[in-house]
Image: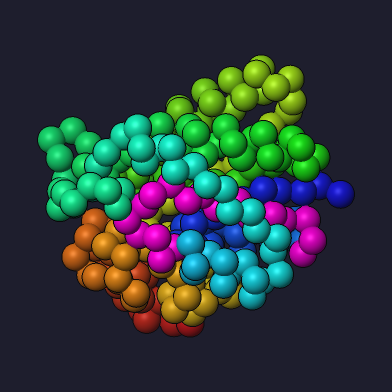
């Protein structure tokens, strides 16, 4: 049986990926991996656990708090900085985060007999994060295959979608309301979203655009 491991935060993107994986691979063939790294938006840990339990998806929560000890930015609890756009990258960019997450996901996947690793990174709405780019994912995929002599396949279902299109995908999976009501995206750790941080603004903008589109097309 073909299986998949989903890097899962409990946010809009990773939950959409989780539902897509369940549709593509089937119940019992999907696992979730969540990371605790000292993130300010720690509510995502309890949200992801509730979603995984509700969907009957085995979830591993991996403590990588060391990441929060060796770097500092506005996304980490120990740093009291306000969330800002930044000159080159937003100050929510955590150095090495996706590279570390995917390395650890690959180690777990291999030990569970899984080759397909699914992550919700996106170049279209990547907020300036270099480790969300398609070229990085392809490069890391090759490196992981060489490092472990294993045929990993890093799958990025959202890579070329903007947030409106991610909402459309959720709707096509029949999970629009679930993702709107039960996922957590807010960097400021506010239940339901603060409405002001970059993550909330991006999510809300895409949601409003999709709602206008579906009203026009009568798709929902």
Viewer-side residue, 42 vs 69: 69
Q: Residue at x 31, y 34 (%)?
A: 71
Q: Quadrant of residue 11?
A: bottom left
Report whether 200 appears left or right of 142: left
Where does residue 212 sit, x and y in percent of width and height?
32, 75
Where does residue 124 sit, x and y in percent of width and height?
36, 45
Vertical order, 176 against 129 (above or below) = below
Report whether 18 appears left or right of 114: left
Q: Residue at x 64, y 75 (%)?
A: 54
Vertical order, 129 against 61 (above or below) = above
In this view of the protein, can residue 130 be seen by the observer? no
Q: Residue at x 80, y 40 (%)?
A: 113
Vertical order, 188 against 179 (above or below) = above
Where does residue 77 sit, x and y in percent of width and height?
30, 52
Where does residue 136 sit, x and y in percent of width and height?
45, 28
Q: Is residue 114 magenta?
A: no
Report whether 81 appears left or right of 100: left
Q: Which residues are magenta?
A: 27-44
In this view of the protein, can residue 34 be seen by the observer? yes
Q: Residue at x 71, y 69 (%)?
A: 56
Total number of numbered discs in the rendering: 0
Report whether 57 appears left or right of 192: right
Vertical order, 102 against 9 (above or below) = above
- Residue placed furthest toward the top: 146
Q: Is residue 29 magenta?
A: yes
Viewer-side residue, 111 vs 16: 111
């Amino acid at each position: 049986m073909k299986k998949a491991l989903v890097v899962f935060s409990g946010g809009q993107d990773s939950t959409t990926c989780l539902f897509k994986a369940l549709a593509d691979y089937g119940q019992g063939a999907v696992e979730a991996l969540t990371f605790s790294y000292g993130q300010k938006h720690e509510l995502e840990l309890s949200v992801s656990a509730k979603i995984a339990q509700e969907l009957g998806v085995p979830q591993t929560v991996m403590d990588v708090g060391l990441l929060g000890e060796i770097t500092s930015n506005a996304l980490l609890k120990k740093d009291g900085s306000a969330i800002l756009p930044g000159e080159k990258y937003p100050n929510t960019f955590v150095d090495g985060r996706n590279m570390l997450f995917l390395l650890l996901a690959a180690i777990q996947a291999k030990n569970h007999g899984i080759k397909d690793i699914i992550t919700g990174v996106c170049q279209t709405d990547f907020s300036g994060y270099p480790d969300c780019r398609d070229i990085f994912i392809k490069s890391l995929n090759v490196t992981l295959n060489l490092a472990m002599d294993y045929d990993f396949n890093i799958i990025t279902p959202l890579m070329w979608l903007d947030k409106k299109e991610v909402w459309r995908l959720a709707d096509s999976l029949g999970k629009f309301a679930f993702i709107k009501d039960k996922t957590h995206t807010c960097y400021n750790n506010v239940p339901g979203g603060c409405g002001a941080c970059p993550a909330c603004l991006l999510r809300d903008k895409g949601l409003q655009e999709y709602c206008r589109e579906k009203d026009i097309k009568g798709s929902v």
